[in-house]
Each structure stands twice: as structure tokens, then as C-alpha cells.
Image (cartoon, coloured by chain):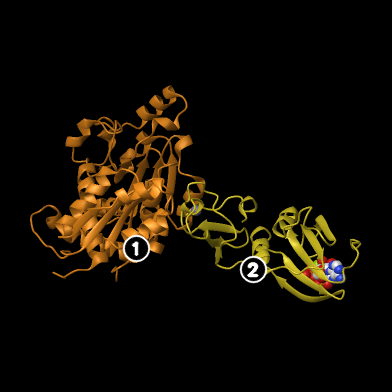
């Protein structure tokens, strides 16, 4: 298959192997909006993945490296994503995102009656009960978190 | 096993062995709960009842249990008023109440409130219900009632009937029954059946689960019939409610097919799910079940507060 043509970047970050369809949520996690864009961002949606079968999204951000909190959030919505750091056109670092056993302060509980949504001085905390599908259980109300991307903090 | 100083937030925090130990202790508490014998190992201890919503029965049964063991009880529920009107957080309220007593019994409208309280309190917190109606002492007293009537819970066929969708009491009960090796039959109209993810979870843990809307078809196999209330508010159409409520009303003719030693339980209060004529049969165990709330709560208080041994 012919390689997709996106101009190579000198410095920046490639977020590869994003679950197909999640790239817009990745942009949200990166805090991309009209007032924050100050370098080129390329977004590939639903491109064939060379790794096995299926499809993926890819986001390439120039002149920027991600902070660990962002990477943790990406792990929540795209558990197979790879973070690739490009320096001087070459891959300087590459690692897979990884969910910790406990996810704390990244996402709020989807249960409106949960005590963590009532202005108490605690961070919402979840136990990861299924990594591959990012199934999280609230450590306070015990409910399974639904719709992670809408509840990202 | 050491329960001293432990929070009682969810039944899921306890292993089967730990629950069995609490049930054994509950059994020892029965004569003291009935006032036949006296024992005051908790004299000098203070229990604080902090109720953000009224629940007279639960509050009084904790009070009674504490008094039977010689503990004093203070009702700190007034703290909840100032905390709500002044916008104080539960975390701060708990830190205050913590100073007044040796253990806090908490009832709160929001889910997870007891877990949060336990985090901010130095003394142990007992969950007396947070949010949708589940509380571990209810589950313990249900297990206690089954075990004391049947000898063991292993292999029992337990029929849960009523609102299995919204009733969190039956959710945590079925989870615990799975741990105890029971078989479950879930009887409800389709719109009130147990949520799929909970049923899947029970099956994953190895529990044989059968689901049906036909109570009469399964009643003859039941060892325990656990009845819960179906709330009218769940039905937009009142005639639909009447139809459903009628299908699951327990009376003597319904019980004709039941095994002689099948027991009927209900968390109470009942409205008309069980006809009064059932009360005088050997099947009826719901008043005994309500009484069991005392020895079970005594056992919990003794276990977490310590005090002198016998
Ligand atoms: N200079 C660059 N500019 C833009 N994208 C780059 C650059 N270098 C690498 N990439 C992209 O970064 C990702 C990882 O690069 P790598 O060369 O490791 O590819 P790979 O062998 O396909 O790795 P993987 O097994 O992780 O898919 C690919 O999507 C690649 O297109
Ligand atoms: Mg590749
Ligand atoms: Zn929650």
C-alpha cells in the first residue's frame, strides 16, 4: 500500500495507532482550539493500520511534546496509541500509552448522583477493570463509567 | 481476622470468611439482642448517628444495638442541617463529627458518600445507606436470616422477586449470595429485570442465574423467596402497575406449590406485596429478618469498636 503523504516534521509528536474515530477527542485532550494553535497539526482519520487488520487515526503535532497527564488521558480513549517523539526528523522516543491500575483526577464520574460530583475536596478515582476496552469503575459510587470522552476533566 | 477500626462501607470489601465470622458473632449476640442476657463490652464508647435523610428504622436499630452493648449514642444529624444550609462539604462535617464519637453511622443521599466519609474520618464509618438504597448491614442481616433458617447458604435456590432493576439492595445481596455459592432465580417483569451487566457479573463469578417473569412457574423450586417492593412511580401507566403488582403478590394460594420449609423474606416495609394471611404461616420470616438487624449490628459494632472480651 502506498504511504500516506504528510510532510515530515522536524520536531514534534506523533500520536499513532489511535482507536479509529478518536482523533478529535485526542485533539480535545491536547487542548487544541482556535486560540491555542500555534503550529501545524495533521490529523489522519481512519487510515489502514499496518499492524494487523483494521483502521486507526493518527495525529501529528509540530513543535510540541506532551505532558504526562495528556498521555494518561489519551490512554483512556485510545488504549493502543503510541506516542512517537520526533527530534530533527527522526524518531527519538517511542512508547505505548499505559493505563495505571487506578485512574485519578483525569475524568469525572458519569453518575450525576455520585458524591465526587458534589463539590467535595476529592479527585474522582476509578479502578481499571478492563484495560483493552477502558472499563473503569468509580471507587466511590461503584458505577461503571460511561462515555469517557465526554467526562474528561 | 481483625475488624477493629475498620470501615463498613460495602459488603464487597469483605471476604466470605470475614462475613462468616461476622455472622457467627451475630449468632452469639442473639440472646443479648433479646435482652435475655446482658453484656456491656462497649460501655464508655460513643456512637454518632449522622443521618442526612430520615430512616427511622435503620437509625433506631443502630441505637438499640449500641445500647444493648452498653455504648452511648448521640444523634449528630443536626450537623447535616448546618452543613447543607451553610454549604459545608461532607468532608468537613465528617471531620467535626469524628471528634464527638468513636464510630459514625452515616446515611446520605449521594452514592459513594460513605466511602468519602471513611476517607476523612479517623474513626470507623458504617454505611447506613448512601444513595440508591444499598447498605451493607441490610445484606448482612439478609445473609444471617438465610443461614440461620437453612443452616447454610451453599447451593440454596434463592428466588428474588420484584424491582430488580433499581433496587440496589438486591444488587448487593445477589453479589454476596454468589460469593456464598447460592443459585439465583430472578423474577421480574421485563422492564424491572436485573441490569444485564450485573447478571453477566454474577454468571462470570460462577453463579447459576435463571431469569423469568413467571413467579408461579418457579416457586415450587425455591428455598428462599425474597420479595421486594415494586414502586408505582416506575410505571407511567397506573393500570400497567396494577397488573404487574398483582402478578407478584404473595398470598397463601400462591404458596400452595411451595416447599414446606421455603422461607419468605422482605426488607420491609411492605405495602401489599405479601398478604397478611401469610404472616401466620411457617414460611413468613420477614419479622424475624427485621429483628436480625439488631444482633447483626451488635456484632458489627463489637467487631469494629473492640471493648472487653467475654
Ligand atoms: N519525521 C516524521 N514526521 C512525521 N511523522 C513521522 C516522522 N517520523 C516518523 N513518523 C511517524 O511516526 C510513526 C512511527 O514511526 P516509525 O518509523 O517508528 O514507524 P513504524 O515502524 O510504523 O512504527 P510502529 O510499529 O509503531 O507502527 C509512524 O506513523 C510514522 O509515519
Ligand atoms: Mg506503523
Ligand atoms: Zn462515582
Q: Is residue A146 left or right of residue B45?
A: right
Q: How far is the residue under mark 2 from the one under mark 1?
A: 32 Å
Judge by depth and name the residue closer to the eye, B188 or B303.
B303
Give x and y (percent) for residue B138: 30, 50
Q: Quadrant of the N terminus of chain A?
A: bottom right
B82 is higher (above) or lower (below) than A4: above
Report if residue B151 is visible in the image: no
In the rendered image, the residue lying farthest to the front is: B86
Q: Is residue B107 left or right of residue B64?
A: right
Judge by depth and name the residue closer to the eye, A150 or A147.
A150
Q: Dot 1 lies on which element? A: loop
Q: Which circle marks residue A98 in the picture?
A: 2
User: Chain letter of disc 2?
Assistant: A
User: Chain letter of disc 1?
Assistant: B
Image hue for chain B: orange
Image hue for chain A: yellow
Q: Residue at label 1?
A: B7
Give x and y (percent) for residue A10: 87, 71
Q: Residues within 10 Å of mark 2 (few under 14, many from 20)?
A: some
Amino acid at each position: 500500500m502506498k504511504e500516506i503523504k504528510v510532510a515530515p516534521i522536524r520536531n514534534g509528536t506523533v500520536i499513532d495507532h489511535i482507536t479509529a474515530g478518536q482523533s478529535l477527542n485526542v485533539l480535545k485532550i491536547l487542548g487544541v482550539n482556535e486560540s491555542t494553535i500555534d503550529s501545524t497539526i495533521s490529523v489522519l482519520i481512519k487510515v489502514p493500520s499496518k499492524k494487523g487488520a483494521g483502521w486507526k487515526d493518527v495525529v501529528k503535532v509540530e513543535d510540541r511534546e506532551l505532558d504526562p497527564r495528556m498521555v494518561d488521558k489519551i490512554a483512556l480513549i485510545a488504549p493502543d496509541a503510541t506516542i512517537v517523539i520526533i527530534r530533527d526528523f527522526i524518531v527519538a522516543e517511542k512508547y505505548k500509552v499505559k493505563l495505571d491500575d487506578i485512574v485519578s483526577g483525569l475524568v469525572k464520574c458519569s453518575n450525576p448522583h455520585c458524591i465526587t460530583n458534589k463539590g467535595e475536596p476529592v479527585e474522582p478515582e476509578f479502578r481499571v477493570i478492563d484495560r483493552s476496552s477502558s472499563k473503569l469503575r468509580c471507587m466511590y459510587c461503584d458505577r461503571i463509567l460511561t462515555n469517557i470522552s465526554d467526562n474528561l476533566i | 481476622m481483625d475488624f477493629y477500626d475498620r470501615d463498613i462501607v460495602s459488603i464487597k470489601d469483605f471476604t466470605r470468611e470475614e462475613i462468616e465470622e461476622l455472622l457467627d458473632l451475630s449468632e452469639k449476640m442473639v440472646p443479648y439482642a433479646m435482652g435475655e442476657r446482658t453484656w456491656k463490652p462497649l460501655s464508655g464508647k460513643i456512637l454518632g448517628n449522622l443521618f442526612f435523610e430520615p430512616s427511622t428504622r435503620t437509625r433506631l436499630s443502630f441505637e438499640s444495638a449500641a445500647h444493648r452493648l452498653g455504648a452511648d449514642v448521640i444523634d449528630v444529624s443536626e450537623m447535616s442541617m448546618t452543613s447543607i444550609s451553610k454549604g459545608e462539604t461532607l468532608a468537613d462535617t465528617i471531620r467535626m463529627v469524628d471528634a464527638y464519637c468513636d464510630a459514625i453511622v452515616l446515611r446520605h443521599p449521594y452514592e459513594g458518600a460513605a466511602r468519602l466519609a471513611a476517607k476523612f474520618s479517623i474513626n470507623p464509618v458504617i454505611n447506613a445507606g448512601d444513595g440508591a438504597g444499598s447498605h451493607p448491614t441490610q445484606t448482612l442481616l439478609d445473609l444471617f436470616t438465610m443461614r440461620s433458617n437453612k443452616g447454610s447458604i451453599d447451593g440454596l435456590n434463592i428466588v428474588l422477586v420484584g424491582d430488580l432493576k433499581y433496587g440496589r439492595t438486591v444488587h448487593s445481596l445477589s453479589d454476596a449470595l454468589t460469593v456464598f455459592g447460592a443459585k439465583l432465580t430472578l423474577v421480574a417483569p421485563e422492564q424491572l429485570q436485573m441490569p444485564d451487566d450485573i447478571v453477566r457479573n454474577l454468571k462470570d463469578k460462577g453463579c447459576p442465574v435463571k431469569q423469568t417473569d413467571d413467579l408461579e412457574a418457579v416457586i415450587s423450586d425455591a428455598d428462599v423467596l425474597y420479595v421486594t417492593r415494586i414502586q408505582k412511580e416506575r410505571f407511567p401507566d397506573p393500570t400497567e402497575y396494577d397488573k404487574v403488582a398483582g402478578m407478584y403478590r404473595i398470598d397463601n394460594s400462591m404458596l400452595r406449590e411451595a416447599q414446606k420449609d421455603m422461607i419468605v423474606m422482605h426488607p420491609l416495609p411492605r405495602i401489599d406485596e405479601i398478604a397478611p394471611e401469610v404472616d401466620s404461616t411457617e414460611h413468613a420470616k420477614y419479622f424475624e429478618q427485621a429483628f436480625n438487624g439488631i444482633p447483626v449490628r451488635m456484632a458489627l459494632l463489637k467487631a469494629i469498636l473492640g471493648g472487653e472480651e467475654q
